[in-house]
Amino acid sequence: MEVKREARAGTEEKSDIVVTVSPGSEGIRLELESTVARSFGNAIRTTIENVVREAGVTDVNIRASDKGALDYVIKARTKTALTRACR
């Protein structure tokens, strides 16, 4: 998959995450802002990066604003944003 445009998925509500993806040229670049970054920041980053790799995307910029989302929500929002960006 190739990221062709900027796209986002998610809301700013509690227990959700907003994932915004845009075309990149230097691999997977991830910027994370999270209310639980101290405890779960590495796990959130790993989850997002794994979804991106599974989708076959190699060059992408990602901004994620997390409000305590569970793992399955992070995966779903990332997949949705990627799908929207690759259309």
Image (cartoon, rainbow, N blue to C red):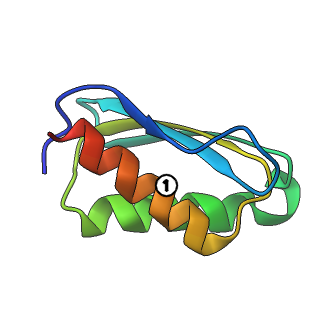
Q: Is residue 23 above or below residue 74?
A: above
The amino acid sitting under disc 1 is Arg
Q: Is residue 40 above or below residue 29?
A: below
Residue 63 shown left or right of residue 71 in the figure: left
Judge by depth and name the residue closer to the eye, 60 or 80: 80
Residue 30 shown left or right of residue 86 in the figure: right
On the image, the x and y values in percent for residue 81 come to 38, 45
Would you name the residue on which mark 1 appears? 77
Quarter location, residue 86: top left
On the image, the x and y values in percent for residue 74 come to 57, 61
Judge by depth and name the residue closer to the eye, 31 or 84: 84
On the image, the x and y values in percent for residue 44 come to 63, 61
On the image, the x and y values in percent for residue 68 come to 79, 57
Give the residue drawn at x 78%, y 57%. 15
Give the residue drawn at x 38%, y 65%. 51
Give the residue drawn at x 14%, y 39%. 87
Quarter location, residue 11: top right
Q: Is residue 17 above or below residue 73?
A: above
Residue 15 shown left or right of residue 45 in the figure: right
Q: Secondary structure at mark 1?
A: helix
Judge by depth and name the residue closer to the eye, 50 or 85: 85
Residue 69 shown left or right of residue 79 in the figure: right
Q: Is residue 38 above or below residue 71?
A: above
Q: Residues within 10 Å of mark 1 (few under 14, many from 20)?
A: many
Count of labels in the image: 1
